[in-house]
Image (cartoon, grey):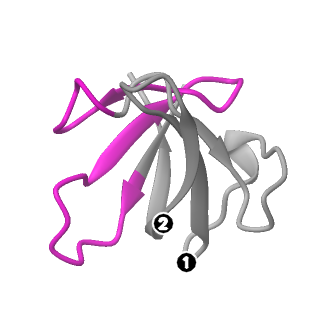
Amino acid sequence: MIRIHFKDDGQDILWWDVNEEGVVERCNLQEQIWPGTKVIGSSGGAVQPQDIKPGEKLLVIYQSGRGGEFIHPVTKVENLVKAA
């Protein structure tokens, strides 16, 4: 599990814990929204969490509560650490 810390640009979310498949398992806020979200690379392709680099902007595939999904950009990655 990798913890992705995001650059603080005033958004609610500051970190995600992402499993080996690139799926968000835990976060600091909005726990009803982000878990289950799939992290993809800035080019729109699959990405391994350990390959994410500081400064990179990520895209995510978000499953909306209305049964659909959409691709959503997130703020820049500040750093990554191994999650407990």
Location of residue 68 in the rendering, given as x and y in whole percent from the top left corner: 54, 31
Res. 3 image quadrant: top left
Q: Are marks 1 and 2 in contact (CB under 8 Å)?
A: yes
**Closest to the observer, 84 or 61:** 61
Res. 28 image quadrant: top left
- Seen in the picture, residue 26 relative to 74 is either above or below; the reply is above
Q: Could you tell me which residue is drawn at 76 percent across and 52 percent down? A: 51
Task: State the predominant SS element of the stretch in magenta.
Answer: loop
Mark 2 residue crowding within 10 angstroms, few (<14) / some (14–19) / many (20+) = many
Location of residue 84 in the rendering, given as x and y in whole percent from the top left corner: 38, 21
Location of residue 35 in the rendering, given as x and y in whole percent from the top left corner: 39, 24
**Closest to the observer, 42 or 1:** 42
Secondary structure beneath dot 1 equals: loop
Q: Could you tell me which residue is drawn at 23 percent across and 78 percent down? A: 9
Look at label 1 and name its amino acid. Answer: Gly
Task: Give the magenta part as a residue range.
Answer: 5-33
Secondary structure beneath dot 2 equals: strand
| Residue identifier under label 2 | 77
Location of residue 47 in the rendering, given as x and y in whole percent from the top left corner: 78, 46
Mark 1 residue crowding within 10 angstroms, few (<14) / some (14–19) / many (20+) = few
Q: CA distance from mark 1 to mark 2?
A: 5 Å
Task: Name the N-terminal-most of marks 1 and 2.
Answer: 1
Q: Is residue 25 magenta?
A: yes
Q: Specify the quadrant that holds the N terminus.
A: top right
| Residue identifier under label 1 | 55
Q: Is residue 61 visible?
A: no
